[in-house]
Image (spheres, grey):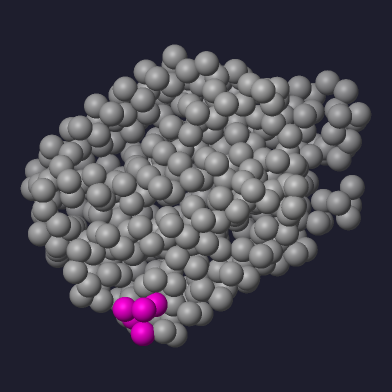
Amino acid sequence: MIQKNNYVVPLSFIGIMFFSLGFALGINSFLIPVLKNSLDVTSAKSYFIIGATFIPFLIFGYPASMTIKLIGYKKTMALSFLIFAGAFLLFIPSAKEHSFPLFLLASFVSGTANTFLQAAVNPYITILGPIESAAKRISIMGICNKLAWPVAPAFLVFVIGKNIEQTTVDDLYLPFYIIVGIFLILGAISLLAPLQEVKAVGEDDTNESASCPYAASKTSIWQFPHLLLGCLALFLYVGVETISLGTLVDYATSLGLPNAQIYAWIAPIGIVAGYICGIILIPKHMSQAMALKYCSVLAIAGSLLVVTLPGNISIYFIAMIALGCSLMWPALWPLAMSDLGRFTKSGASLLIMAMAGGAVIPILFGWLKDEVGAQNAYWICLPCFLYILYYGCCGYKIRTKRA
């Protein structure tokens, strides 16, 4: 761990990286309606763009953790930006050829870059300081990440000079060339950043029985039930948060609302409000587990309001879902990674793989949208949040009961 008075510099650089992650994912919310209009694909097919972005978490989660062990956190971050640049370069021929499969491939490569960067920055920020205040640090990073989601479609609209409703794939060349250059610069910044290599308590495997007794008797990562239950919670959380962030522009378009891109700000506003609360309240006034419980209840209420209120009103209550999602990520990571000792990097790789929920849940949402309509498709959020509530109440405690 880095001493408290040295947090500011690492947090600043990692904050830039979290912003980059949000920006890359936010591009999907722009592409979905554009591809639907230009290439005449169904909602279910268009949401495969999000699916292609998140499937790499399942495939490359473990290789990413092995890469970190081999070359360290900082070089892995730089490598991820190089892959990002290649992904956005691939979007250009995808647009020229009007090829939906090529768009999926480009999204897959972007997701691969996202996997490597997420595998590096999330455990890094978690173990940068005391585990009890990890949610506060992750909340700060979350603000950087979630504000970037609506910046992406706003940036694309600004560079193209057209609203989303008027944009076609032929308008995408210039903005993607600019994005390629930006990510190459970020890769260079990553290599030059003054980021120390960090390790979790007990990760060195020296005198682990004293530093991390719970992990000392374990021989496999599969012997940590609180981690495995946390992986399922994270799988569902990433799926429903991606729905809250990635479907707003498409939902506004379905409702016939003008300037659909401006609705992309609804969810980030809710999430950032929650993150600010986390920064203020955790851990002094609220534990990470308590934050997870409160947020789950908020998200459940928000889901019910979105599916029951009139459409042009319900879209604003997606902010309530997003508010509920806000502290789930900051709480789930430290709760699931507690007392992993020498298995810390392996545990982090499982959690990164669990982010594949961002592929499965949105694709199911797209299918439901075709079958029962955009508003009713949001019913998919309810069972996901109910399970996350269970984890916040009981699931994470399995570790302490068996310790």
The quarter of the displayed image where residue 386 is located: bottom right
Residue 303: where, in percent of width, then height? 50, 74
Give the percent coordinates (x, y) of residue 223: 78, 46
Instruction: Tell me which corner region of the image, top left, top right, bottom left or bottom right, holds residue 62.
Output: top right
Q: Is residue 301 above or below residue 310?
A: above
Residue 13 in the image, given as x and y percentages of width and height: 48, 26
Give left or right: position of 2 versus 401.
left
Magenta region, residue range: 310-314
Residue 240 in sight: no
Q: Residue at x 52, y 16 (%)?
A: 194
Total marks shown come to 0
Left or right placement of residue 230 versus residue 207 in this view? left
Task: Name the chief secondary structure element in magenta.
Answer: helix
Q: Quadrant of residue 249?
A: bottom left
Relative to 42, 296 lies left or right: right
Evaluate whether residue 291 shows in this view. yes
